[in-house]
Each structure stands twice: as C-alpha cells, then as structure tokens.
C-alpha cells in the first residue's frame, strides 16, 4: 500500500481462515525494501476481491503515528 505521495507504507497479506485452519505455512513472503516498523493483524469478514473471512497481516514501514495520519 502506498500513501498519497506514492511512498510505500505497508505490505498487506490477506490470509483466508480456511488456510490457517489447514495449518498452511507461509514461508519467505516478500516485503518492501524498507525495514518494517511494526505489524498489525486484523480480522476481516470478507470484502470485494477476497469475499471469504480472512486476516490482514499488515507489515508497516511507518510508525503508528504516521499510520494514524494516513486515515
């Protein structure tokens, strides 16, 4: 995900519950070329593009204060 100025601020992985329930591993996931600042994990019941229930694993490259300013 990019901010309004085109700066990479987050890598988001959307992992369906069925894959977690199946004990699937996710190894060597790619992230941006910056060092991550923090990670958040959020449940999502589904949305266009990923209609089934899943978790968003957000790898943030900016501080929590900068994330709040993006909203």
Image: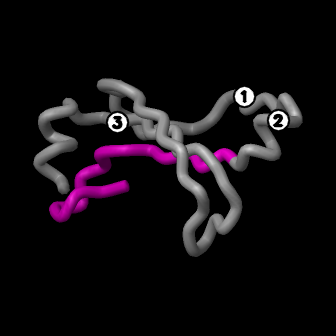
User: Residue beneath label 2, please?
Assistant: 21
Q: Which mark is residue 60?
A: 3
Give the residue at x 57% y 74%: 48
| Main secondary structure type of the part rendered in magenta | loop
Q: Residue furthest bottom?
A: 48
Please name whichever residue, 26 or 42, is drawn nearer the observer in this view of the structure. Answer: 42
* Badge 3: residue crowd in 10 Å (few <14, some 14–19, many ≥20): many
* Badge 2: residue crowd in 10 Å (few <14, some 14–19, many ≥20): few
As drawn, 25 above or below 5:
above
Image quadrant in which the N terminus is located: bottom left
Q: Secondary structure at mark 2?
A: helix
Q: Which mark is residue 27?
A: 1
Sequence-wise, the earlier of marks 1 and 2 is: 2
Residue 31: x %, y % from top left: 49, 37
As drawn, is 54 to the left or to the right of 1? right
Q: Is residue 64 magenta?
A: no
Q: Is residue 3 magenta?
A: yes
Q: Residue furthest front?
A: 45
Range drawn in magenta:
1-15
Give the residue at x 73% y 32%: 26
Q: Secondary structure at mark 1?
A: loop
Q: Number of labelled discs?
A: 3
Image quadrant in which the C terminus is located: bottom left
Sequence-wise, the earlier of marks 2 and 3 is: 2
Residue 20: x %, y % from top left: 77, 36
Q: Are marks 2 and 3 in contact (CB under 8 Å)?
A: no
How far, Cα to Cα, is label 1 from label 3? 18 Å
Give the residue at x 21% y 42%: 67
Q: Are marks 1 and 3 in contact (CB under 8 Å)?
A: no
């Amino acid at each position: 995900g990019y901010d309004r100025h085109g700066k990479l601020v987050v890598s988001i992985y959307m992992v369906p519950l069925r894959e977690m329930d199946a004990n699937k591993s996710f190894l060597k996931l790619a992230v941006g070329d910056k060092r991550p600042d923090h990670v958040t994990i959020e449940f999502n019941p589904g949305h266009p593009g990923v209609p089934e229930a899943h978790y968003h694993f957000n790898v943030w490259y900016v501080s929590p204060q900068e994330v709040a300013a993006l909203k």
